[in-house]
Image (cartoon, grey):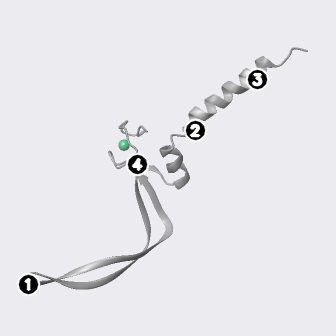
């Protein structure tokens, strides 16, 4: 896949989601100090932010998971539209003349 913003080749996207992050906080000893340790229990998205960003240029490319997945599957919508149109034209030409 080629990023439409920076034209770099990419095969994955950063995903940033807003929501509630449930972690477990505990302290552990590190040398003479106590260090806070957050252990992830569960993340619950609230649907407000769901950005899919290019790992090369960090531009938001999608805000819709379906479009992000379609992009990674390389289902280019424009390409599909062109193919559809070409098939229609072909069908028309194949129709017997009355
Ligand atoms: Zn990019």
Residue at the extreme left: 32
Q: Label 4: few (<14), some or many (≥20) within 10 Å?
A: some
Is 7 situated left or right of 62 in this image? Answer: left
> Ligand 1 near label 1 (Cβ, under 8 Å)?
no
What residue is pinned by disc 4? Answer: 12
Q: Residue at x 20, y 84 (%)?
A: 28
Per the model, the C-alpha gap separating discs 1 and 4 is: 41 Å
Vertically, is 36 above or below 47?
below
User: In the picture provided, is 2 more to the left or to the right than 80?
Assistant: left
Disc 3 element: helix
Identify the mark at residue 91; answer none if there is no mark.
3
Separation (CA) of disc 3 from disc 1: 78 Å
Label 2 secondary element: helix
Label whose residue precedes the other's in the sequence (2 or 1) = 1
Disc 2 C-beta below 8 A from ligand 1: no
Distance between mark 4 and mark 2 Cα atoms = 18 Å
Residue 84 percent across, percent down from the top left: 67, 31
Q: Which mark is residue 77?
A: 2
Q: Position of residue 19 (x, y in %)?
A: 45, 71
Q: Are marks 3 and 4 in contact (CB under 8 Å)?
A: no
Residue at numbered disc 1: 32
Of mark 3 and mark 1, the one earlier in the sequence is 1
Disc 2/disc 1 C-alpha distance (Å)? 58 Å
Q: Residues within 10 Å of mark 1 (few under 14, many from 20)?
A: few
């Amino acid at each position: 896949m080629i990023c439409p913003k920076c034209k770099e080749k990419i095969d994955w996207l950063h995903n940033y989601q807003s929501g509630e992050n449930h972690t477990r906080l505990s302290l552990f000893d590190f040398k003479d100090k106590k260090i806070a340790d957050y252990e992830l229990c569960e993340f619950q998205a609230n649907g407000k932010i769901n950005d899919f960003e290019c790992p090369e240029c960090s531009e938001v490319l999608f805000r819709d998971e379906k479009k992000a997945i379609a992009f990674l599957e390389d289902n280019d919508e424009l390409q599909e539209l062109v193919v559809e149109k070409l098939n229609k034209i072909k069908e028309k030409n194949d129709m017997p003349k009355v």
